Image (cartoon, rainbow, N blue to C red):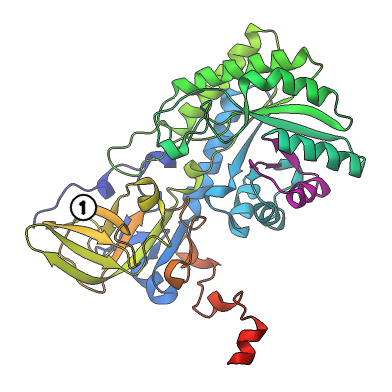
Amino acid sequence: MEENKSFLTQEIDLKSPNRNIVPITTSIGNDGKLYIGGCSIEELIKKYDSPLYILDEITLRKSCRAYKEALEKYYPGKSLPIYASKANSSLFMSNLVSSEGLGLDAVSEGELLTALKGGVPNEKIVFHGNNKSDKEIEFAVRNNIQVILDNDYDLERLEKISNTFNRNLEIMIRFTPGIECHTHEYIRTGSFDSKFGFGIDYLNTLFDRIKNAKNLSLRGLHAHIGSQIFELDPHKDLGEIMVNVILNAKKFGHDIKKLNLGGGLGIKYTENDDPPSIDEWVKTISTSVVKACKKYNLDLPTLMCEPGRSIVSTAGITIYTIGAFKEIPGIRTYLSVDGGMSDNPRPITYQSNYSACLVSNPLNINSKNTYTIAGKHCESGDVLFKEIELADCKSGDLICVFGTGAYNISMSSNYNRIPRPAAVLVCNGESEIIQKRESPLDLLNYDVLPNRFIKQN
């Protein structure tokens, strides 16, 4: 039999999971089938049904520890990695990152509540967002969560709320440093033209306004230059820029104690991707800040960073069951699965690419067929893979899509009234539900018929 080269035969990077396509615990059993976390994928589907999100605990913990250890290694001052919970927000994820000593960033009351209920200490939570509501700001203030100002609207309301509560609030500000990265247009957030943060040219005016605010103390700066970044040089520049902003803030009497350099480190979705390791990325941001502080004779601030995708994405996989086949002679063969854009909107939104294999033939032995893998939704663009090579397969076979831990569960929807899949945690041969599967009846829980319609019927 011919055995094709497969990403599953490549050596696993145990120190930096973001450089792997597959979770650290991925293996092929004696039966030739796919296992994750010591669990048979086929058995998991029998137990939990399909489609199914699966998270590998060991990969998650390795990723968290890689950030913690690298910061301790390269940054001589205080440091705190903060999990960007938008990537995958749940009670479980909040609890896991907290147990590893990480903080968490949130952008809504829902994410804040999930973090607190999941056990993240309030002093390790930061509250982001470009259009925070009064209710959300008040929730953060009541729970002693640090708010990061994004615009003048934030500042006006935080001034008012701090006066109402008669409480001095330590705040941070987000600004756009004007650094461009080679990433998708929709996920560039560090350029001058961005909906996020204050413009760097406006900072002196802002510093003056905050100086005159009765109950606000500026203690930190935040900047984020993009997502799925493979370049290190922009982060070298970012450290120098942020330290210069500290110097400017000092002229207005502000004592900056925290620098948050955001996140954005890329992961390996396909064999063509070559992201830096977590160690390399942390070394770059740490060295740039230390060098700039020495240059200007500044005490080292607490260094913060906000990894999201690079912590959770590689740890996650999604399993689908193959249904219909449609061959268009001379053009393509469509292979349809029991999920799609409602459980993974990234291909239709960002044209994102992934890696996948058959659960029953993960090494693609005797691979000779090219398929277009389509979702089941009523959209022509609901395509997970435009072209992928797989071994012979049939209806009922299982497909595993790798790298789906980030922005799949969190961006999922009920389009076409399709319930969201369950999510399962695997570790050392054991599995446990961390998010229940929705049912069609669940989708009716918040529907209400007006009284006059009920009377008419």
Number of labels in the image equals: 1
Say above or below: 216 vs 48.
above
Q: Between residues 70 and 88, which one lies in front from this camera angle?
A: 88
Q: Which residues are magenta?
A: 125-149
- Give the image location of residue 311, x and y in percent: 50, 44
Residue 305 lies in quadrant: top right
Q: Between residues 393 and 211, which one lies in front from this camera angle?
A: 211
Judge from the rendering whether residue 354 lies leftward or rightward of residue 150; answer left or right: left
Judge from the rendering whether residue 401 lies leftward or rightward of residue 312; answer left or right: left
Q: Which residue type does callout 1 highlight? A: Glu
Residue closest to the far right = 166
Q: Between residues 198 and 93, which one lies in front from this camera angle?
A: 198
Is 186 contained in the magenta span? no
Any part of residue 26 in sight: yes
Residue 434 lies in quadrant: bottom right
Say above or below: 247 vs 140.
above
Q: Secondary structure at mark 1?
A: strand
* Quadrant, the N terminus: bottom left
- Circle 1 residue: 387
